[in-house]
Amino acid sequence: MIELRNISKNYGNFFALSGVSLQIEDGEFVAVVGESGSGKSTLLNLIGQIDTPSDGEIIINGKTATKLPEKEVAAMRNKTFGFVFQSFFLEPTYTVTQNVEIPLLLAGVKKSARAERVSAALQKVGLTEKANNKASDLSGGEQQRVAIARAIVNDPPVIIADEPCGNLDTKNGDGVMQLLKELNGEGKTVLMVTHSAEHAKWAKRIIKLCDGKVLYDEGSNV
Ligand SMILES: Nc1ncnc2c1ncn2[C@@H]1O[C@H](COP(=O)(O)OP(=O)(O)OP(=O)(O)O)[C@@H](O)[C@H]1O
Ligand SMILES: [Mg+2]
């Protein structure tokens, strides 16, 4: 469970987020929507512990992340969250396998277990046959599926996806949405930013931001 208590993030006088409080239960599928600059990425980055708030508290599975030392925050981040971004962020010269393996290397997983888990993650996203291709040789849709395999290979309970379909055509975008839906169906919490009204409908809950505040928050908690 993720709880934000009165979170603000400001840069000088400018508030990217101000006074945001919300709870996200395990297993929810949440779409975060709102105009460019409304604070969507800031919100996801704060939840995913890749940014820190200026004010307020973030509690993740009972631990107040905002009070933990950086080392513990890093450990919590690796264990809890898998990230997918609009621009994939693959290592272009690495193979597909090497890209997906990165979180396992960071987590100190042994070689034999790594091979098994990479292969399971690639099977999940339908890219078994591309395992030995260089990442830069893949199409955009395939590259995003590699990024999803990398996000799930450590089996984190929460997937954070910031405009995962932003650089994809409709067909590939729908494929990514289908994968996110499947992962949610398997029990993962999915937090996704989207500019697409169609894609937002795939989520069970929609949080709309406007000027750093929650404009509305609709849909059932699990
Ligand atoms: N490091 C920074 N310094 C100053 N302002 C920042 C910084 N990071 C973000 N902002 C501002 O905070 C606001 C919210 O940014 P954020 O990236 O969260 O928007 P967004 O809703 O994700 O927009 P988009 O849909 O364009 O991705 C923006 O006005 C942005 O310019
Ligand atoms: Mg953004």
Image (cartoon, rainbow, N blue to C red):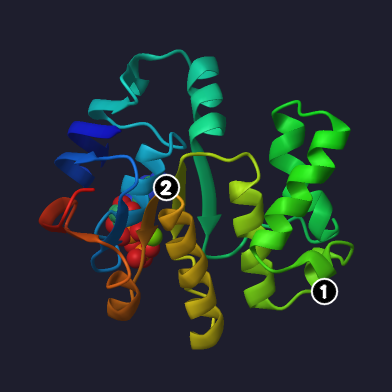
162 shown above or below 117: below
Residue on which the image places disc 2: 187
Q: Which residue is drawn at 56% across and 80% down?
A: 172
Name the amino acid type tagged 1: Asp
Q: Where is residue 48 in the image (x, y as percent from the top left)?
A: 43, 39
Q: Position of residue 39 (x, y in %)?
A: 28, 54
Q: Which of 49 and 15 is in front in this view?
A: 49
Q: In what quadrant does ligand 2 lie? A: bottom left
For residue 67, the mark is: none
Q: Classify mark 1: helix, strand or loop.
A: helix
Q: Which of 177 and 124 is in front in this view?
A: 124
Q: Residue at x 85, y 59 (%)?
A: 93
Name the amino acid type tagged 2: Gly
75 shown above or below 213: above
222 shown above or below 125: above
Q: Which of marks 2 and 1 is nearer the N terminus?
A: 1
Q: Classify mark 2: helix, strand or loop.
A: loop
Which image quarter: residue 40? bottom left
Residue on which the image places disc 1: 137
Q: From the viewer's perspective, tell me whether residue 108 is left or right of residue 31.
A: right
Q: Which of 70 and 145 is in front in this view?
A: 145
Q: Residue at x 68, y 53 (%)?
A: 121
- In this rendering, does residue 12 appear at all? no
Which image quarter: residue 114? top right
Q: Position of residue 200 (x, y in %)?
A: 29, 70
